[in-house]
Image (cartoon, rainbow, N blue to C red):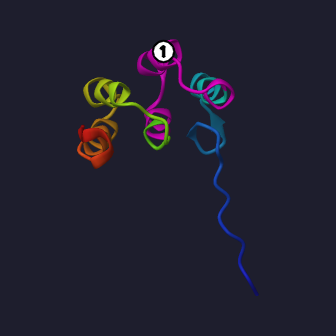
Amino acid sequence: MRTLPVYKDPRMIIKRGIVDGVSEAYRLEFLEKGISTTWFKNVLDNGSAQLQNHLLDHDKITKAILLQLAEHGVTKKVRNKAHQKLKSKKFKT
């Protein structure tokens, strides 16, 4: 018998079954409109670490955004990931 792949919920959740309303609203706005300065400031102020980590994985992230996340990220994991991306060949110049 074959097993099904594990379902990965794309929503921003606090814990299993509980959706983080603020971060989920920011995620949906991000999917509709993309990255804007006001959206990014709101994410820095109110967004969760999960949302900031999701932003770091986006392919159209800029060096300025990485610098701000490296300094003002919510968790150490987000700050370290931003520092690591800044060291990559794409953002060194």
Residue 64 at what x, y percent from top left? 34, 24
Viewer-nearest residue: 45 or 60: 60
- State the predominant SS element of the stretch in magenta: helix
Foreground pick, 80 / 66: 66
13 drawn magenta: no
Looking at the rendered image, the quarter that the N terminus falls into is bottom right
Residue 6 in the image: state x and y as whole percent: 65, 64
Q: Amino acid at mark 1?
A: Thr
Picture layout, residue 65 above or below residue 90: above
- For the point 72% across and 72% down, the residue is 4
Question: Where, quadrant-wise, is the C terminus in this rendering?
Answer: top left
Tell me if 49 is positioned left or right of 79 in this view: right
Residue, far bottom: 1
Mark 1 secondary-structure assignment: helix
Q: Which residue is mark 1?
A: 37
Q: Position of residue 73 (x, y in %)?
A: 33, 28
Q: Does residue 37 belong to the magenta stretch? A: yes
Instruction: Return the residue nearer the eye: 92 or 55.
Output: 92
At label 1, counting other C-alpha atoms closer than 10 Å, the crowd grade (few under 14, some 14-19, many 20 or more) is few
The location of residue 27, given as percent across then percent down, is 61, 30
**In this picture, residue 44 sits left or right of residue 14:** left
Instruction: Please state the extent of the stretch shown in magenta in the rendering.
Output: 29-54
Residue 42 against residue 6 in the figure, above or below: above
- For residue 58, above or below residue 31: below
